[in-house]
């Protein structure tokens, strides 16, 4: 009797694993084998995941702002400057390269009809190194024909990182937007489903503004209360000690009615968070934030052991810390 054909057999034609799109673990594998992704190319992807890089943006100008735009800011863009060597290898003219918090359908990148590139920051990461994943999407966009998005794929383990592709002497200057009109070259002319999709996306964006008086601090507004989220590059243990000193001394607020409520941990950096009165605007935060920065600098300069009250304040801060990634 002939043996029964094995179920879910692999396709007879070999498939380049790097060309298989990343999908959900329980979805059918895009290679056509009939098996779930986690039992097919997803298994290979899991084995290929690199060791987690805790600070993927370290060494880039504006590291704290990279983290903020990845985790906290709904709509923002930043012009990027590539090295001359990378630009020389692009397919056709590249008028500009722009980092965007998110792109339609969470595309990793988009090559516009004029050859310019939009690189999405809030996208799925397929490895332990977000910088390498973003660099892979950028390289693919530079090789893509104008007018096309870049699909999700796994980055090669030995591929370049953003630190290899970007001009590290160029400034990193985010522009925070109220909506996602930057998706389109001419948003005012959008009609039909495109206009409807843009309207839905804009409605979901939490109002956010970047403070000018200090680095990497972002005000956001919600119906019940506002918040200030401030991404800091100070080493976590040192920062927590300083915040504890200020909290114990009653100097951790940034104005009347405000309260330091905890912190996030994101991509190797610490993000203290304050609750603000609903009437407190981003402009109202500027002077108090600058004054707090001076007090924080003084607290960071102290190397005295924490007092009992400061240790209690520190333990309270640690108990309310949330890790985003």
Image: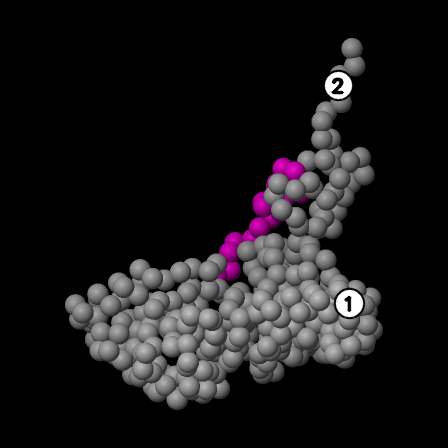
Asked if residue 282 can be seen in this view, the reply is yes
Q: Quadrant of the image for the N terminus? A: top right
Residue at the (36%, 86%) spot, across then down: 288
Assess disc 1: are there few (<14), some (14-19) or many (≥20) residues with their C-alpha within 10 Å of its C-alpha: few
Assess disc 2: are there few (<14), some (14-19) or many (≥20) residues with their C-alpha within 10 Å of its C-alpha: few
Q: Residue 83: percent from the left, percent from the top?
A: 68, 77
**Is 26 placed above or below 140 here?**
above
Give the Cα separation between the discs numbered 2 and 1: 53 Å
Residue at the (66%, 48%) spot, across then down: 23
Q: Which residue is mark 1?
A: 192
Residue 300 as seen in the image, left or right of residue 10: left
The image's mark for residue 4 is 2
**Is 325 placed above or below 226 here?**
above
Residue 223 as seen in the image, left or right of residue 18: left
| Residue at the top extreme, as displayed | 1
Tally the numbered discs: 2
Mark 2 and mark 1 in contact? Answer it, CB < 8 Å: no
Which quadrant of the view contains residue 119?
Answer: bottom right
Which quadrant of the view contains residue 265?
Answer: bottom left
**Is 150 placed above or below 286 here?**
above
Q: Residue 37: percent from the left, percent from the top?
A: 65, 41
Residue 3 lies in the magenta-colored region = no
Residue at the (56%, 59%) spot, across then down: 129
Of residues 190 and 171, the one drawn nearer to the viewer in this rendering: 190
Q: Which residues are magenta?
A: 36-54
Disc 1 is placed on an element classified as helix
Residue 308 as seen in the image, left or right of residue 287: left
Residue 45 lies in the magenta-colored region = yes
Q: Residue 134: percent from the left, percent from the top?
A: 63, 64
């Amino acid at each position: 009797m002939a043996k029964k054909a094995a179920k879910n057999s692999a396709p007879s034609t070999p498939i380049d694993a790097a060309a298989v799109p990343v999908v959900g673990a329980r979805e059918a594998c895009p290679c056509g084998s009939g098996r779930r992704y986690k039992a097919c190319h997803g298994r290979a992807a899991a084995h290929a995941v690199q060791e987690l890089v805790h600070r993927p943006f370290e060494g880039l100008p504006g590291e704290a702002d990279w983290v903020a735009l990845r985790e906290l800011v709904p709509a923002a863009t930043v012009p990027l400057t590539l090295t001359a060597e990378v630009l020389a290898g692009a397919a056709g003219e590249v008028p500009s390269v722009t980092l965007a918090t998110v792109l339609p359908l969470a595309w990793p990148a988009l090559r516009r009809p004029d050859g310019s590139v939009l690189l999405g920051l809030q996208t799925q990461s397929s490895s332990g190194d977000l910088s390498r994943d973003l660099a892979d999407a950028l390289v693919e966009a530079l090789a893509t024909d104008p007018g096309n998005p870049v699909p999700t794929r796994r980055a090669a383990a030995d591929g370049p990182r953003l630190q290899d592709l970007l001009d590290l002497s160029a400034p990193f200057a985010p522009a925070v937007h109220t909506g996602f009109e930057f998706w389109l070259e001419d948003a005012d002319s959008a009609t039909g489903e495109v206009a409807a999709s843009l309207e839905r996306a804009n409605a979901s964006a939490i109002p956010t503004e970047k403070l000018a008086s200090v680095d990497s601090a972002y005000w956001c507004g919600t119906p019940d209360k506002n918040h200030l989220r401030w991404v800091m590059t100070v080493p976590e243990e040192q920062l927590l000690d300083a915040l504890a000193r200020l909290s114990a001394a009653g100097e951790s607020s940034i104005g009347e009615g405000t309260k330091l409520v905890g912190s996030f941990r994101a991509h190797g950096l610490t993000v203290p968070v304050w609750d603000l009165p609903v009437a407190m605007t981003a402009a109202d935060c500027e002077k108090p934030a600058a004054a707090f920065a001076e007090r924080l600098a003084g607290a960071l300069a102290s190397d005295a052991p924490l007092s009992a009250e400061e240790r209690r304040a520190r333990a309270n801060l640690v108990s309310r810390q949330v890790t985003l990634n």
